Amino acid sequence: MHPAGLAAAAGTPRLPSKRRIPVSQPGMADPHQLFDDTSSAQSRGYGAQRAPGDLSYPAASATPQAAFLADPVSNMAMAYGSSLAAQGKELVDKNIDRFIPVTKLKYYFAVDTMYVGRKLGLLFFPYLHQDWEVQYQQDTPVAPRFDVNAPDLYIPAMAFITYVLVAGLALGTQDRFSPDLLGLQASSALAWLTLEVLAILLSLYLVTVNTDLTTIDLVAFLGYKYVGMIGGVLMGLLFGKIGYYLVLGWCCVSIFVFMIRTLRLKILAEAAAEGVPVREARNQLRMYLTMAVAAAQPLLMYWLTFHLVR
Amino acid sequence: LGIHFDHIWQKTLTVLNPMKPADGSIMNETDLTGPILFCVALGATLLLAGKVQFGYVYGLSAIGCLVIHALLNLMSSSGVSYGCVASVLGYCLLPMVILSGCAMFFSLQGTFGIVSSLVIIGWCSLSASKIFISALDMEGQQLLVAYPCALLYGLFALLTIF
């Protein structure tokens, strides 16, 4: 809404332009040079011209030159506003690209309803699925749309937002709700996620594992546990503690198996791909790492939800 | 002023009939007149029902628009501008205005109120996702787009009920 707001502000007379005079003063010594500046149509000189044009507006009906000025001034106002909006948009786009790799993220959001349905089924019941390998197409993994094993970011993102909302709902039913508590819940969950990602990246680095497990992949895998958490809390709201423990237990075991089977291929694949001479200790260390990551998921699932269900 | 009343009416009709497939070209010009009108109407009906919550309405709509804009940009092959997202979400707020209008006459906290708000949320999100799908040419993703819209309209419904 920001560019629209700025354009609207540029269109309203007097007040914004009066504040703008000191800012655009450096180039303009004499505000009465407005006739010369109109033809050059520079946005720098816009502020200085605008104010005298408006101050002389009450006399516009008397002087035809000032009346003629009213139209170009409003046109210039619109041009300035829209150019400011375009500049703002460019600035945002450039800076966003520096911090968030948008094209890489687009791969993780190329999902469709069938994929989401199958993946959710896999998260709750991973026991019958046989082939966990992601298919490749000329060195790049295929989009999640075409392969149910590929990680995506749609489910973790939606699950995270739903978890925050369901937590708000749960707190509301216990009469402990307030909007800042919602923000607190969201930021604490985000903090735990960041901590987890950093811890796993650190341990991967220490074990000197060469994997093609990117950070975004890791965030995606770690975000899948929120689905189980939502299920547990919803069951807890509907059926009390018994329902909560049952569903949470089931989801914990499922996530444990899911993580083991998925990470095994990612972390241990290199070892298997190297062929026969595999150092035993290194392989065992990787196995322990996978087990540790998978075991941390149920613990975090319980830790982040038990205070929501009374 | 650039306000075309027949365009506004056409878009409103598209929203009111969620089952009819939408035309992809209706969103070519983004106008914010209709959405702003519906937002103000929502605030007015909430006021008449005794809840002065303009700040929450505007804040929620701004944040929700931002999140859905980011999500749609990542999910669709062609990008979408912020004005277009705000326009579509604002138009699909119309059934929510109807709900809060009903809230003036009878309290929504009973079973009937909960059921009708669920129906209205579904209606809003189906229309919004239908317009987004046809305007951005995304296949097989209608439910995926409808889910975040349903979350957003659910928050609006919470404002209306409580």
Image (tube, coloured by chain):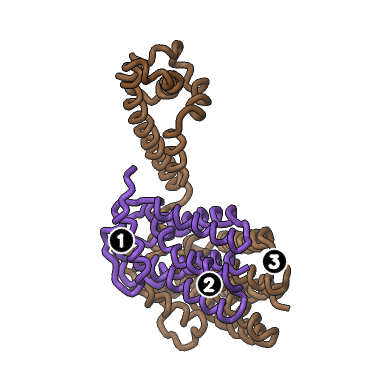
Quadrant of the image occupied by residue A283: bottom right
User: Which residue appears at 55% of the width and 82% of the height?
Assistant: A254
Q: Is residue B52 left or right of residue B123?
A: right
Q: Colour of chain A?
A: brown
User: Which residue appears at 43% of the width and 60% of the height?
Assistant: B89
Look at discs 2 and 3 and give the one toward the viewer.
Answer: 3
Identify the residue position indicated by label 1 in the image: B10
Residue A161: numbered disc:
none
Residue A224: numbered disc:
2
Which chain is in purple here? B
Quadrant of the image occupied by residue A288: bottom right
Look at discs 1 and 2 and give the one toward the viewer.
Answer: 1
Identify the residue position indicated by label 3 in the image: A177
Q: What's the residue type where badge 2 is placed?
A: Tyr
The verdict on a common chain for dots 1 and 2 is no
- Residue B56 position within the rendered picture, expressed as x and y whole percent measured from the top left: 59, 56
Quadrant of the image occupied by residue A194: bottom right
Q: Is residue A162 left or right of residue A243?
A: left
Distance from Cα at disc 1 to Cα at disc 3: 41 Å
Helix, strand or loop at mark 1? helix
Q: Residues within 10 Å of mark 2 (few under 14, many from 20)?
A: many
Check the residue under mark 2 and report the chain it is in: A
- Residue A25 position within the rendered picture, expressed as x and y whole percent measured from the top left: 48, 17
For the residues bearing labels 1 and 3, Cβ distance under 8 angstroms: no
Helix, strand or loop at mark 2? loop
Q: Vertical placement of A126 versus B43: above or below?
A: below
Distance from Cα at disc 1 to Cα at disc 2: 41 Å
